[in-house]
């Protein structure tokens, strides 16, 4: 049985530049024939992962529950081995050779060839294996003949390694029950069998209405220049927009449990943290300039069993054009509810829905109304555990 936990949010941001493209302009997209503001899924997931880090500080999650995305795995392993009373230089070399046995090459600058998404439990377990197999990790073993191509050199290093070391390491390259790895997945190019398929999908947020780029012309003055000197000492422009975004994500509950090695308690804790983060975490782009701290004003969570996931972005295929004195967010919520009910009538699979409705829209039977984010999360998680 498939259980999908879906979250829909409408969030109206004041003038801002939350997620920039390579030119510094706010990201956008064509949708329904009009230009829309956009915030990428990668940006939104990064904000949620930063929320996880805050929950660690608040002791609601542990450091072992989250992962690092890094090229500096060697440094982390070296640090862990130093804490086990090994000399730093020797620890670094042993860790390098252990990684080489799994075809993970570390370059001369101490960084891996690409970013690795590694759970902190996973890193600790790798360090423990290196410590326990210390004497079998031979410095001469992974050396490859000169002139070999990188791919062949990797394979040569792996072939020369202690098979017991490889077998032990193979067992712990499993994501380490890190919530963000389980939710968002990972790819290890040199170890495809250790890839983890994401339990969560996050859509690019798009504005429910058409947008145009705007420009803020700014100047700055040298505080110490002579009073009789006129003119600005620096000037430039910043692009921005203001938009009501439709945001959507879906979590495959059974896949999340599987990714977390059947730990249902951790899966429930992680799902709640994700849903909370999806609502409260904000992209940080240019926030020191714009301070667009505007929480969502309409949030719905649905639990659908044995049905298909259902992104409701097509509620806004025709760009919303509110009338004079009409709330853009409220009008967007009306269209969202209308689309959800039309799809339910056509395809079935209503499921259970709870809605936090701060815009006063008539939900007309669309789910159960709740009065707070806590209540929204409590009802959703209680239903999931039934």
Image (cartoon, rainbow, N blue to C red):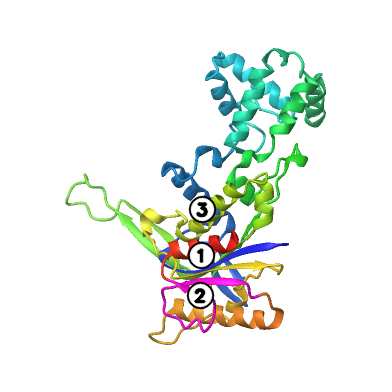
Q: Earlier in the sequence, mark 3 or mark 2?
A: 3
Asked if residue 133 lies left or right of residue 299, the reply is right
The x, y position of residue 356, in whole percent, is 46, 71
Write the start and end of the magenta stretch as one range.
350-370
Q: Which mark is residue 368?
A: 2
In which quarter of the view is residue 165 placed?
Answer: top right
Residue at coordinates 67% horizontally, 83% vertically from top-left?
345
Residue that badge 3 annotates = 273
47 is within the stretch colored magenta: no
Q: Are marks 1 and 2 in contact (CB under 8 Å)?
A: yes
**Picture quarter with the C terminus:** bottom right
Image location (x, y in percent) of residue 327? 42, 80
Q: Are marks 1 and 3 in contact (CB under 8 Å)?
A: no
What is the crowding at mark 1: few (fewer than 14 residues within 10 Å), some, or many (at least 20)? some
* Residue at image location 52% in from the left, 55% down from the top: 272
Q: Is residue 202 above or below residue 149?
A: below
Residue furthest to the bottom in view is: 323
Say which residue label 1 marks: 379
Q: Residue at x 65, y 32 (%)?
A: 112
Camera sees residue 115: no
From the viewer's side, name the closer residue of 299 and 151: 299
Disc 1 versus disc 3: nearer the observer = 1
Q: Earlier in the sequence, mark 1 or mark 3?
A: 3
Q: Is residue 191 left or right of residue 216?
A: right
Q: Which marked residue is nearer to the observer: mark 3 or mark 2?
A: 2
Q: Secondary structure at mark 2?
A: strand
Q: CA distance from mark 1 to mark 2?
A: 10 Å
- Foreground residue, 39 or 383? 383
**Quadrant assignment, res 338:** bottom right
């Amino acid at each position: 049985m498939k259980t999908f936990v879906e979250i829909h949010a409408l969030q109206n941001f004041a003038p801002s530049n939350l997620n920039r493209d390579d030119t510094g302009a706010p990201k956008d997209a064509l949708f329904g024939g009009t230009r829309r503001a956009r915030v990428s899924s990668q940006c939104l997931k990064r904000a949620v992962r930063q929320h996880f880090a805050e929950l660690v500080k608040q002791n609601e999650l542990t450091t072992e529950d989250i992962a690092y995305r890094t090229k500096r795995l060697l440094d982390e392993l070296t640090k862990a081995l130093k804490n086990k009373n090994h000399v730093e230089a020797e620890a670094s070399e042993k860790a390098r050779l252990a990684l080489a046995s799994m075809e993970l090459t570390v370059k001369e600058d101490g960084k891996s060839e690409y970013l690795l998404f590694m759970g902190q439990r996973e890193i600790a377990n790798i360090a423990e294996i290196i410590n326990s197999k210390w004497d079998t990790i031979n410095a001469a073993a992974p050396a490859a003949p000169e002139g070999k191509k990188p791919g062949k050199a990797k394979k040569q290093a792996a072939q020369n390694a202690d098979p017991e070391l490889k077998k032990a390491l193979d067992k712990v390259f499993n994501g380490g029950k890190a919530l963000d790895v389980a939710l968002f997945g990972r790819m290890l190019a040199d170890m495809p069998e250790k890839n983890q398929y994401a339990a969560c999908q996050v859509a690019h947020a798009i504005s429910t209405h058409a947008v145009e780029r705007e420009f803020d012309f700014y100047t700055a003055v040298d505080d110490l220049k002579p009073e009789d000197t006129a003119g600005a000492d620096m000037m430039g422009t910043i692009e921005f927009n203001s938009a009501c975004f439709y945001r959507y994500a879906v979590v495959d509950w059974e896949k999340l449990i599987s990714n977390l090695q059947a730990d249902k308690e951790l899966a429930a804790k992680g799902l709640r943290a994700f849903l909370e983060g999806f609502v409260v975490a904000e992209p940080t782009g240019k926030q020191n300039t714009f301070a667009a701290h505007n929480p969502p004003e309409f949030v719905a969570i649905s639990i659908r069993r044995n049905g298909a996931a259902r992104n409701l972005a097509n509620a806004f295929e025709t760009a919303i054009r509110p009338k004079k004195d009409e709330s853009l967010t409220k009008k967007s919520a009306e269209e969202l509810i209308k689309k959800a009910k039309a799809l339910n009538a056509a395809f079935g699979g209503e499921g259970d829905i709870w809605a936090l409705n701060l815009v006063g829209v008539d939900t007309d039977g669309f789910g159960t109304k709740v009065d707070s984010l806590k209540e929204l999360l409590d009802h959703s998680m209680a239903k999931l555990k039934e």
